Image (tube, grey):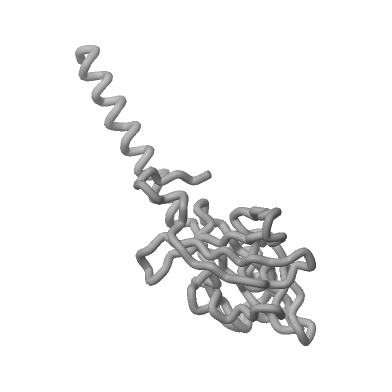
Amino acid sequence: MTGQAVCDEAMRWMRVVALALAVAAVAGCATPSQIAVGQTRAQVVERLGAPNARHALDGGGERLEYARDPLQQTAWMVDFDAAGRVTAVRQVRTLENFARLRIGQDDTIVLRREFGAPWRIERYPLSGLTAWMYPYVEDGTWKSMIAVHVDGRGIVQRVENGPDPRFIGGHGRED
């Protein structure tokens, strides 16, 4: 075999190994959408791993937050009853869910429990408000951003929707 043939053969095997590793990685990935109502907390954690956060629910239940999307456009919440069984699994960063926010009533505790950690928190000293920024995909297509403005007490004062600034101009920035 010539040196070039050996090189070509090695490259072919490296591609085969890389493809096999990629297929194995995808096959082993568990997503919250695969969790069924009635499963136990232990089963969920075994399948999905440790949650990003835990939130107490009324009646002794608990919500586990799973936000693994590198662009932070999705956040999954898995709700459990007091007995530790799954009652609901849902992707919460949707326009419909953001529309349920109550101006003057909801606070940052509700924001964390309902939508998870924000992508960014921006302070606006002139208005005295702080915006919790949540990226999401609107209508399955548009890379959008919800800015939930809270006052100094953490109470929601305003909600604004617009394009995700990381994607304006086609640069695909992720900062």
Q: Nearer the viewer, residue 54 or 39?
A: 54
The answer to whether residue 163 is left or right of residue 148 is left
Q: Which of 129/90 is in front?
A: 129
**Of residues 92 and 148, which is closer to you in this image?**
148
Q: Is residue 5 left or right of residue 140?
A: left
* Residue at the image point whose x is 62% and y is 74% from the top: 78
Q: Residue at x 27, y 20 (%)?
A: 7
Q: Residue at x 79, y 68 (%)?
A: 153
Vertical comparison of 95 with 59: above or below? above
Is 7 rendered above or below residue 38? above
Judge whether 21 appears above or below 26 on screen. Answer: above
Q: Quadrant of the N terminus?
A: top left
Q: Position of residue 26 (x, y in %)?
A: 43, 54
Instruction: Report x, y in % for residue 32.
Output: 54, 68
State which quadrant residue 142 falls in.
bottom left
Classify 134 as above or below 9: below
On the image, the x and y values in percent for residue 72 come to: 53, 57
Left of 172 or right of it: where is 71? right
